[in-house]
Image (spheres, rainbow, N blue to C red):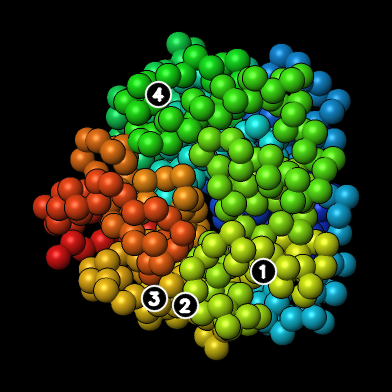
Amino acid sequence: MGVAEDALAAEVVGRGVWHALGAPPQELQLDFCLPTGQSFRWRLTGEKEYTGVIGNRLVCLRQLEDDVLYRVLARGQDADPAADATVLHDYFNLDTSLGHLATGWATSCSRFRDVSPHFPGARMLRQDPLECLFQFICSSNNHISRIHGMVERLCSSYGTPLEPTTPPPPSEGASVGTAAPVSAGASLMDTAEGDTPFAGSAKPTKRHAARGPRSAAATTVGGTGVFKDGEASELSFYAFPTLQQLSKATEEDLRAAGFGYRARFIVGATQALLAKPGGGRAWLLGLRQVGLEEAMEALTELPGIGPKVAACICLFSLDKHQSIPVDTHVWQIAVRYYCPALRGKSLTKKIHGEIQQVFVERFGPYAGWAHNTLFISELASQQHRLPEHLRQIKTQAATAIGSTRGKSRSQARANRNHEDDGIGELDEPEGPGTLDVENGGSDDGGNPMHRRNRGGGSGVAAAAVAEPQHGKRALGRWRQQGRKKAVDMTGTVVEVMAT
């Protein structure tokens, strides 16, 4: 956004359409918080502008040079407009000064000191733990664009449509790029998973019929839209479903909707949470009051949640600021800079704990926040922000967990290419032990493409994953397919060759 647009936006703030969040760039940069794997509810809907759902509010955020603006486009029935600022403040953890913490971390780690100036404002979100839990069940052995699709299908099928607020007068809306109200009945879920989900200023691509269950109601949303040739695209948003709403989902329905083996975990986790005394959401919120180890143990008793996913839930929603989710990128950071003796070892629960402790000893009680900046600096989609001498060029899948010994060249290539999806692989021991790189389709039916994983495998596969029972059959189908494409949320096409 240019200076003129900043001035116009500031003028509109004065008229009450947009509101200033009061977060300078060293404290909050949307590009480093919303599309980097913490949450899968946000869409890039304009230049430096994101639209997504926080609880039962549909919120549009716009990055300025010295602050972030927000506007609530829709609210659930119980959402008090007077509480909007408090909700945003809580969601972005703005009581914690990231700038102050980063100054200390830079003195304790040369790598952090080198890369952090290129990723300012990469802070941790404080999400609703119920929503966070099911998002990361969907993340297992998955990539960003497909996780987005799964989460949106859950919301549009079982969640509550968000009613629009009154749109601003056209003259005010035009000055900050807002759109007129759009037609009802269209959802983010109608976008094919292989398509870019509202990236940049592009209009959504051709719409496909929804697979699996759908909500009967879709809402008209006024406010910021995506423009192409002066035409506003259609957006519909839903609150994340409650446990009672999720209880209507069956494994059969979810499998038909493309969730694969995760369908069983979603249904199982819903039932387990509903059985908790006082209710599952209250039980999850109660985990904010216990220590990290106790919270991890409690979470890993739920279906579909292993140490990695539990660590994500703890860090992104349960105030466990020292939690370290260990994926391929974090493993590489740990081996390269802090504990090289771990190179070639399998990622067991014990090793995960050792890496956790190494980060805490280096960065203190907010180690998870520091790790987030280091994690982002490893992503292929973020390498262009770094000077050349700081970039991580991955020439071998062996830089990740385990060894490439015994792996075919096509498998190693798939490992490297999959890292370009913008998030380290979130594989868990509960999964079928495969790395799904296909957009759309289930993992265990239809037209899947799998890469076989053997325990201490290479690339983005974590070592402690059980070998799939259907590995040979799936690998054979993969070879027959020849070539597939994986598209991340920035629109980058990653080709995976099967030889």
Q: Earlier in the sequence, mark 2 or mark 4?
A: 4
Q: Amino acid at mark 3?
A: Ser
What kind of element bears circle 1? Answer: helix
Q: Is residue 470 visible?
A: yes
Q: Amino acid at mark 1?
A: Glu
171 shown above or below 247: below
Alpha carbons under labels 1 and 4: distance apart: 36 Å
Would you say the residues marked 3 and 2 are in contact, meaning their CB atoms lie under 8 Å apart? yes
In this rendering, which labeled residue sits more in front, label 1 or label 4? 1
Alpha carbons under labels 4 and 3: distance apart: 36 Å
Question: How far across and how far down the image is residue 30, in percent?
Answer: 66, 53
Residue closer to the observer: 218 or 329: 329
Q: Is residue 52 visible?
A: no
Alpha carbons under labels 2 and 4: distance apart: 38 Å
Q: Which mark is residue 344?
A: 2
Indicate the quadrant containing the C terminus: top left, top right, bottom left or bottom right: bottom left
Alpha carbons under labels 1 and 2: distance apart: 15 Å
Q: Which residue is mark 4?
A: 251
Position of 59 with respect to 202 (left or right) is right
427 shown above or below 373: above
Q: Earlier in the sequence, mark 3 or mark 2?
A: 2
Q: Residue at x 70, y 77 (%)?
A: 112
Q: Which residue is mark 3?
A: 403
Q: Residue at x 37, y 79 (%)?
A: 396
